Image (spheres, coloured by chain):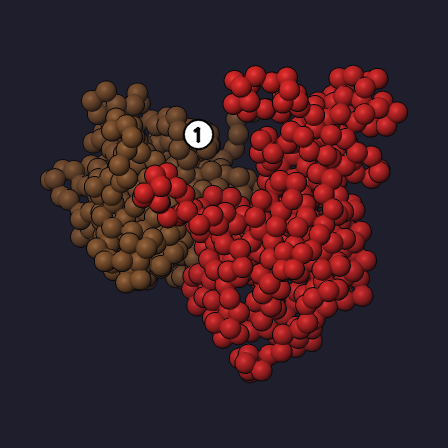
């Protein structure tokens, strides 16, 4: 041990970090086209790491070695990519009317009527739908599927080509404790990982992976974990908060909302189980002890579906004890997600403290 | 062997939480192997040295299906998700036992249509707590289905035959086997029921020359059951294919020849669904010739899985004979 965790001073986390998050949230990085975010990541981490490289799939792999003689090799991953849209065919050249597909999980119900921005160019479009004046009552009951929607780029002069990607055209905004923007999943994690690399962890080798293609199947993390070959891994992600107070089916007998996943402003969400990973119980205990020792609020993400990069990381090579910690956010994978600055800061402080307290003993006991 | 099986199946160890059964298996195999390790995910690896012989990986998974608590409501009822393939129609009225010892019964919300099969989301576990505050269960607590071992004479029944019966066959084989033609890596794997995860990392670590998984398979011998050639009591099954793998033809041939040479009953198995740890071995690194020795089992993933005693004993005999003579791994041109 040798470290008095109670004496640990938590680093400042405020306006500069929010400015970085704003830049990251507004940048466009639909899965498979993560260059814009990668550039911001590299600019920000280069002064703080021993080496940084871009691998064959586009992951940024950075290493920050500790100074102690024996060190634990910890992989920390956050995905750079975000869900978005891809043009699949041009339907009307003159009008600039395109069919499209979604990349990653977007509910078709959130698409109609939204403004989208194309990557690498200052060009916009609108996902059009029939105006209410012309729809019948029956039509309004039906779901508008992707097949019945088009992106309207207003003019063929745009010269936007099939295969190009777009995101919702949402600008980041902060109001009080509230952080609002697109792609908070997972720029919240990316920003925390950038921030962690600024701080020395003498007893650790931090193997940072800013991954690609998480939203289409945890693909980048798979090869990143193989290459980095860590002893243990922690994933920083963003998870839905569906914290409505009640599901009212019968007003006289309101039913408690038992499926909220996480709740906003209840602290960082520690994973127990999702569809891809059963979190390593030694990691769970370490994070919980850290939070309690440091008086940092935390919550458990409800066991359930979904998955993070931990799903592919823990199965690499001979197995890598893994866990995920997420900042909760409402309405992720829609045009605007809402997160709490306090939760985000606490996520940083929890992971920062947990890394400070981490040593090989934590994983010496059998799982 | 019955006592061994009974102890194994009555030890609760759902996927991801296998330490109790691992401890038990370790005690049973200690005298019969040269080295025992536990890897990063919790797989138990036992090695029987034979340095210049081919490396064979034998795997039986030690996890079982179960549930994990997701929410404790104000009245003390516990909502849950399945760990592995838990079917709703086996749940209502069933009982579970959490790893902290607390037991509970599974109840269900009033259904708008009593004919419908409720989803697990409509179910809850009642541990007898008067309210949420005094409920002894926390989010993330894990439980196994509660059902004692049942001896029906020639047939044995338990909630965890899948795959403690494979574990028992592997332990018994290690105990009986004297000289082997292989360096044996016996793996008691974790997290099979949630997606052959333990065997994936164990195979990478071992890098075997060939492999055999020992697991249960379904049968087609019950009234109006699934159409399938395998029956209880007609011998262990040699897998040809399932949804996850095509067994290696050289391994199939070797298994069939060994059974016939030793006058052991066997069945050819084609399972149209499901998969085993065999897939993980076959696809690890550069690939390895792999087969599966299956123990026929009725009612797989119900809390009353049934196997035949003779099938189990013949599986041990067949595996023991297999380990005496290596297969011819040349591909015919």
Measuring from the top left, give residue A128's x and y in whole percent: 70, 25
**Number of numbered discs on residues:** 1
Measuring from the top left, give residue A110's x and y in whole percent: 60, 34
Q: Is residue B47 above or below residue B116?
A: below
Residue at horizontal 25 percent and vertical 29 percent from the top: B114
**Image mark 1: chain:** B
Residue at horizontal 67 percent and vertical 56 percent from the top: A175
Q: Is residue B260 left or right of residue B304?
A: right
**Residue at which label 1 appears:** B243
| Display colour for chain B | brown
Classify residue A69 by image quadrant.
bottom right
Classify residue A67 by image quadrant.
bottom right
Measuring from the top left, give residue B108's x and y in whole percent: 27, 40
Report the front residue among B280 and B89. Answer: B89
| Display colour for chain A | red
Q: Is residue A90 above or below residue B157?
A: above
């Amino acid at each position: 041990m040798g470290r008095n965790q109670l004496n640990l001073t938590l680093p400042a986390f405020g306006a500069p970090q929010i400015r970085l998050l704003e830049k990251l949230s507004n940048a466009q990085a639909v899965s498979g086209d993560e260059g814009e975010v990668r550039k911001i990541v590299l600019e920000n981490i280069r002064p703080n790491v021993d080496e940084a490289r871009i691998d064959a799939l586009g992951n940024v792999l950075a290493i920050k070695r500790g100074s102690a003689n024996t060190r634990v090799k910890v992989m920390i991953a956050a995905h750079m990519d975000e869900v978005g849209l891809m043009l699949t065919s041009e339907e009307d050249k003159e009008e600039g009317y395109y069919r499209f597909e979604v990349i990653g999980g977007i509910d078709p119900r959130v698409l109609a009527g939204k403004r989208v921005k194309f990557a690498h160019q200052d060009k916009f479009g609108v996902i059009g739908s029939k105006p209410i004046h012309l729809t019948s009552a029956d039509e309004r009951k039906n779901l508008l599927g992707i097949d019945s929607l088009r992106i309207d780029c207003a003019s063929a002069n745009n010269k936007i080509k099939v295969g190009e990607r777009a995101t919702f055209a949402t600008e980041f905004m902060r109001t009080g404790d509230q952080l609002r923007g697109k792609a908070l999943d997972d720029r919240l994690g990316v920003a925390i990982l950038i921030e962690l690399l600024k701080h020395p962890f003498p007893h650790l080798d931090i193997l940072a992976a800013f991954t690609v293609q998480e939203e289409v199947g945890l693909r980048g993390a798979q090869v990143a974990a193989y290459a980095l070959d860590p002893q243990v891994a922690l994933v920083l992600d963003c998870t839905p908060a569906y914290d409505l107070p009640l599901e009212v089916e019968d007003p006289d007998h309101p039913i408690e909302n038992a499926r909220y996943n996480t709740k906003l402003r209840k602290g960082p969400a520690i994973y127990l189980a999702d569809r891809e990973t059963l979190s390593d119980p030694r990691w769970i205990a370490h994070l919980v002890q850290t939070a309690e020792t440091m008086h940092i609020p935390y919550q458990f993400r409800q066991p359930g579906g979904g998955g993070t990069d931990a799903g592919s990381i823990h199965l690499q090579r001979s197995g890598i004890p893994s866990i995920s910690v997420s900042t909760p956010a409402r309405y992720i994978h829609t045009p605007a997600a809402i997160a709490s600055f306090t939760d985000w800061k606490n996520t940083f402080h929890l992971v920062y403290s947990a890394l400070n307290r981490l040593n090989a003993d934590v994983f010496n006991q059998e799982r | 062997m019955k006592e061994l099986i009974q102890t194994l199946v009555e030890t609760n160890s759902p996927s991801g939480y296998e330490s109790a059964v691992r401890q038990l298996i370790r005690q049973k195999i200690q005298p019969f192997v040269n080295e025992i390790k536990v890897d990063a995910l919790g797989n138990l690896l036992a090695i029987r040295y034979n340095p210049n012989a081919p490396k064979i990986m034998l795997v039986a998974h030690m996890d079982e299906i179960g549930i994990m608590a997701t929410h404790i409501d104000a009245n003390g009822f516990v909502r849950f998700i399945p760990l592995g393939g838990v079917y709703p129609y086996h749940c209502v009225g069933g009982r579970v036992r959490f790893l902290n010892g607390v037991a509970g019964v599974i109840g269900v919300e009033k259904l708008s249509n009593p004919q419908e099969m409720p989803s697990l989301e409509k179910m809850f576990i009642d541990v007898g707590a008067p309210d949420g505050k005094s409920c002894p269960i926390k989010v993330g607590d894990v439980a196994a289905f509660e059902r004692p071992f049942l001896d029906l004479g020639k047939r044995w029944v338990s909630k965890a035959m899948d795959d403690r019966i494979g574990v028992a066959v592997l332990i018994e084989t290690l105990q009986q086997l004297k000289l082997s033609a292989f360096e044996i890596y016996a793996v008691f794997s974790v997290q099979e029921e949630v997606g052959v995860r333990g065997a994936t990392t164990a195979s990478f670590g071992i890098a075997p020359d060939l492999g055999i998984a020992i697991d249960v398979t379904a049968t087609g011998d019950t009234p109006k059951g699934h159409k399938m050639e395998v029956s209880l009591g007609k011998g262990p099954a040699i897998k040809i294919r399932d949804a996850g793998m095509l067994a290696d033809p050289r391994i199939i041939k070797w298994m069939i020849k060994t059974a016939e040479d030793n006058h052991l009953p066997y069945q050819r198995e084609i399972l149209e669904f499901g998969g085993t740890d065999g897939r993980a071995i076959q696809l690890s690194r550069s690939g390895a010739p792999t087969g599966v020795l299956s123990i026929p089992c009725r009612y797989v993933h119900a809390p009353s899985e049934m196997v035949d005693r003779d099938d189990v004993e013949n599986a041990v005999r067949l595996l023991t004979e297999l380990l005496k003579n290596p297969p011819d791994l040349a591909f015919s041109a």
